[in-house]
């Protein structure tokens, strides 16, 4: 995944590398710049493009992590905290054309997190291949 930190793009091979970047530069500074994925429809605003990039980055993180994504990564990408995660993930799932029921709690690496069900992972991979998110 490609992460943009203060105007510089950095390639992260794993979610652990993303965690290290977020710890060093702060969650607000690390935004996913997964611009290689195409998006249905055109967005003219910078905020809209950034939201689509974040949606695609989170979709990619869930699709590549069958054991789940840590809550702090989800919080950083969606800009929410604590109990708001569940509602924000349901809204995100709807926005990227996934069923909200495909998201469930998980414990990746022994920490709090969230994951997609097996059908959700298959749907996420299909969305990424077609560029429909």
Image (cartoon, rainbow, N blue to C red):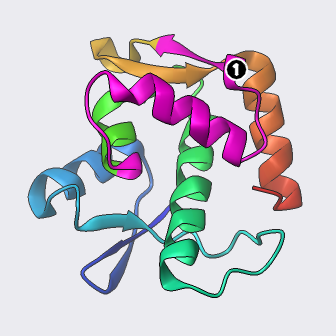
First to last magenta residue range: 77-105
Label 1: which secondary element: helix
Magenta segment: does it hold 109?
A: no
Q: Residue at x 83, y 58 (%)?
A: 132
Q: Quadrant of residue 64?
A: top right
Q: Residue at x 76, y 27 (%)?
A: 99
Instruction: Please give left or right for residue 70 compared with residue 35 in the image.
Output: left
Using the image, determine if residue 65 lies above or below residue 119. below
Instruction: Please give left or right for residue 1 compared with residue 81 in the image.
Output: right
Q: Quadrant of residue 59?
A: top right
Using the image, determine if residue 74 lies above or below residue 110. below
- The residue that disc 1 covers is 102
Q: Residue at x 81, y 20 (%)?
A: 119
Instruction: Please give left or right for residue 66 compared with residue 12 in the image.
Output: right
The x, y position of residue 60, in whole percent, is: 61, 48
Density class for disc 1 (Cα within 10 Å; few <14, some 14-19, many ≥20) is some
The x, y position of residue 42, in whole percent, is: 76, 81
Please name whichever residue, 16 or 69, is drawn nearer the observer in this view of the structure. Answer: 69
Q: Residue at x 84, y 55 (%)?
A: 129
Instruction: Please give left or right for residue 124 compared with residue 48 in the image.
Output: right
On the question of residue 68 being in view, the answer is no
The x, y position of residue 81, in whole percent, is: 26, 34
Using the image, determine if residue 92 lies above or below residue 31. above
On the question of residue 116 being in view, the answer is yes
Q: Quadrant of the C terminus?
A: bottom right
Please name whichever residue, 16 or 120, is drawn nearer the observer in this view of the structure. Answer: 120
């Amino acid at each position: 995944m490609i992460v943009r930190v203060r105007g510089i793009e950095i390639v992260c091979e794993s979610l652990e590398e993303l965690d290290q970047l977020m710890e060093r530069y702060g969650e607000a500074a690390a935004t996913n710049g997964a611009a290689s994925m195409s998006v249905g429809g055109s967005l003219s605003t910078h905020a809209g493009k950034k939201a689509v990039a974040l949606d695609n980055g989170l979709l990619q993180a869930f699709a590549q992590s069958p054991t789940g994504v840590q809550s702090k990564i989800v919080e950083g990408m969606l800009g929410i905290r604590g109990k708001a995660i569940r509602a924000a993930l349901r809204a995100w799932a709807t926005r990227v054309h996934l069923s909200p029921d495909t998201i469930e709690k998980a414990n990746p690496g022994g920490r709090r997190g969230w994951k997609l069900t097996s059908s959700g992972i298959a749907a996420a991979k299909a969305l990424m291949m077609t560029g429909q998110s």
